[in-house]
Image: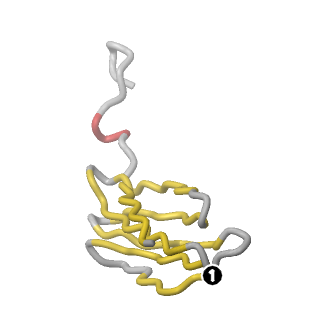
Amino acid sequence: MDASGGVTPSAAPVTGRRLVSTGAGSLIARCDGGLVRLQSWTPAQGFEVDDVDPGPDDRARVKFDSDEGRLEIEVRCAGGVPVPRITRHG
């Protein structure tokens, strides 16, 4: 911390992790050096993993599929933090 009690820029983490949880499944994404990587992904009961692109890349994604439809989670890094975009199909 600096004298004003704030956090100095050098104290900011270089990497960021985030848990993204949906009714179709969940994932853990990590940003490192501007690239995102999926560390793990788990489908919810009644869903299966249809397709996965774990990175590291400028984006990573996983698709969960069930009889009721498909859900895609795409993750990008913004400011060193994983930011998900969730899209439902069908």
Q: How many marks?
A: 1
Q: Amino acid at mark 1?
A: Glu
Quadrant that contains the N terminus: top left
Residue at coordinates 54% horizontally, 64% vertically from top-left? 28
As drawn, the residue found furthest toward the top would be: 4
Q: Which residue is mark 1?
A: 48
Instruction: Work out whether 84 lies above or below 71.
Output: above
Which quarter of the rendering shows the C terminus?
Answer: bottom left
Q: Residue at x 48, y 56 (%)?
A: 17
Image coords of residue 4 (percent x, y): 32, 13
Nearer-the-camera pick, 43 or 56: 43
- In the structure shown, which secondary structural element does the residue marked by tag 1 occupy? strand
Q: Is residue 23 left or right of residue 78?
A: right
Of residues 83 and 25, the one nearer the viewer is: 25
Q: Quadrant of residue 64?
A: bottom right
The front one of 78 and 15 is 78
Q: Position of residue 18 (x, y in %)?
A: 49, 54
Quadrant of the image occupied by residue 42: bottom right
Residue at image point 40% right, 57% down:
15
Q: Where does the image place residue 63, in percent across and percent down from the top left?
A: 48, 77
